[in-house]
């Protein structure tokens, strides 16, 4: 990626920078093929990758719909498309549905263990199996350890790799960033042979519980796209808030 200088940075983005405005900048990419909607091009706004954001800045940007991928903090900024909608769960108000309670009961044997965001052969082996099953033929296929770490970790982020174990067996890993006011669900990978456990859904339910235990307000779930079936699961968590035109609002998305 070779970003170009951002000439049309939204004014609401600057509002989170305060005194950092003079030392922190943004870049806009040229139009590129959208990774979610095959018939569209995308433009992405990035925090200047030469800067190391602190937790306060990262929290402020998360509140304005930004996400992290590796060291990069970004947000879709497509001039002709607003399909990518940032969503978050207000954890204090969340009440699990009957189906979600069944998922929790079905996984009562699972223990959550926090780990440092460093390379683990056991984690990488599970990640490789997950990618082979869920993203066969895609750009993520056949991962390498270095690329795996570059995708999931950032030298400046307060990240934790939460292991989900049934006894000694590793079932899933949720990569989570800790913010000042919430948690950001960066990525989860899990055993693709354990479909009956609904491990992806379990990971979100456990992150909601964790945020509540830590007395945080939000679990940020990234982007929801109505036309992308792979993202439909995000609408299962209610209440849900979405970010548009600089404002978070409550809604029940139609899928």
Image (cartoon, rainbow, N blue to C red):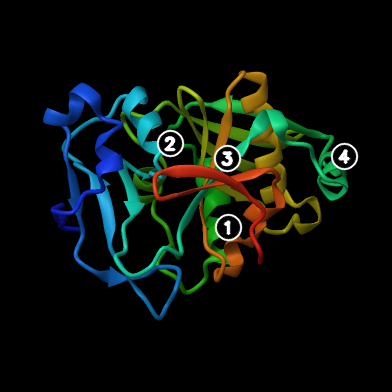
- Above or below residue 127? Residue 255 is below
In depth, the one of 246 and 59 nearer the eye is 246
- Name the residue that disc number 1 marks: 129
Q: Which numbered disc covers residue 63?
A: 2
Is 61 on the left or on the right of 214, as rendered? left
- The mark lying in front, picked from 2 and 1, is 2
Disc nearer the start of the sequence (3/1): 1
Q: Which quadrant does the C terminus fall into?
A: bottom right
Marks 3 and 1, Cα distance to the nearest angstrom?
15 Å
Q: CA distance from mark 3 to mark 4?
A: 19 Å
In the rendered image, the vertical position of residue 181 relative to residue 66, given as above or below: above
Foreground mark, 3 or 2, reads: 2
Q: Secondary structure at mark 2?
A: loop
Residue at mark 4: 105
Q: Quadrant of residue 155?
A: top left
**Would you say the residues marked 3 and 2 are in contact, meaning their CB atoms lie under 8 Å apart?**
no
How many neighbours does mark 2 have within 10 angstroms: few (below 14), some (14-19), or many (20 or more)?
many
Query: Which residue in the protein does label 3 denote?
Result: 174
Q: Position of residue 67 (x, y in %)?
A: 40, 44
Mark 1 / mark 4, whichever is N-terminal:
4
Q: Earlier in the sequence, mark 2 or mark 4?
A: 2
Q: Give me the residue at 58% from left, 58% from top.
A: 129
Kindly indicate whether the residue at mark 1 contacts the one at mark 3 (C-beta within 8 angstroms): no
Local SS, label 1: helix
Q: Earlier in the sequence, mark 3 or mark 4?
A: 4
Q: Residue at x 63, y 53 (%)?
A: 234
Disc 4 on helix, strand or loop? helix
Q: Residues within 10 Å of mark 3 (few under 14, many from 20)?
A: many
- Residue 116 pos. (x, y %): 48, 26
Instruction: Tell me if 241 is positioned left or right of 213 in this view.
Output: left
């Amino acid at each position: 990626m070779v970003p170009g200088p951002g000439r049309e940075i939204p004014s609401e983005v600057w509002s989170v920078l305060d005194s950092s405005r003079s030392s922190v900048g943004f870049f806009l990419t040229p139009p590129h093929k959208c990774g979610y909607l095959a018939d569209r091009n995308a433009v992405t706004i990035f925090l200047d990758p030469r800067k190391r954001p602190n937790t306060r800045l990262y929290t402020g940007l998360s509140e304005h719909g930004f996400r992290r991928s590796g060291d990069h903090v970004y947000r879709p900024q497509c001039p002709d498309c607003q399909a990518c909608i940032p969503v978050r769960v207000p954890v204090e108000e969340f009440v699990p549905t009957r189906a979600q309670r069944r998922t929790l009961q079905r996984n009562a044997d699972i223990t959550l263990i926090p780990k440092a965001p460093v390379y683990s052969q056991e984690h990488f082996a599970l990640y490789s199996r997950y990618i082979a099953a869920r993203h066969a033929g895609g750009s993520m296929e056949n991962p390498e350890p270095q690329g795996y770490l570059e995708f999931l970790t950032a030298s400046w982020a307060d990240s934790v790799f939460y292991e989900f174990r049934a006894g000694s067996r590793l079932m899933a890993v949720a990569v989570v960033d800790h913010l000042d006011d919430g948690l950001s669900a960066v990525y989860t990978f899990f055993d693709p042979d354990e479909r009956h456990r609904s491990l992806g859904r379990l990971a979100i339910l456990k992150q909601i519980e964790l945020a509540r235990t830590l007395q945080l307000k939000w679990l940020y779930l990234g982007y929801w796209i109505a036309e992308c079936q792979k993202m439909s699961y995000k609408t299962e968590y209610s209440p849900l808030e979405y970010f548009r035109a600089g404002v978070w609002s409550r809604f029940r998305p139609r899928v």
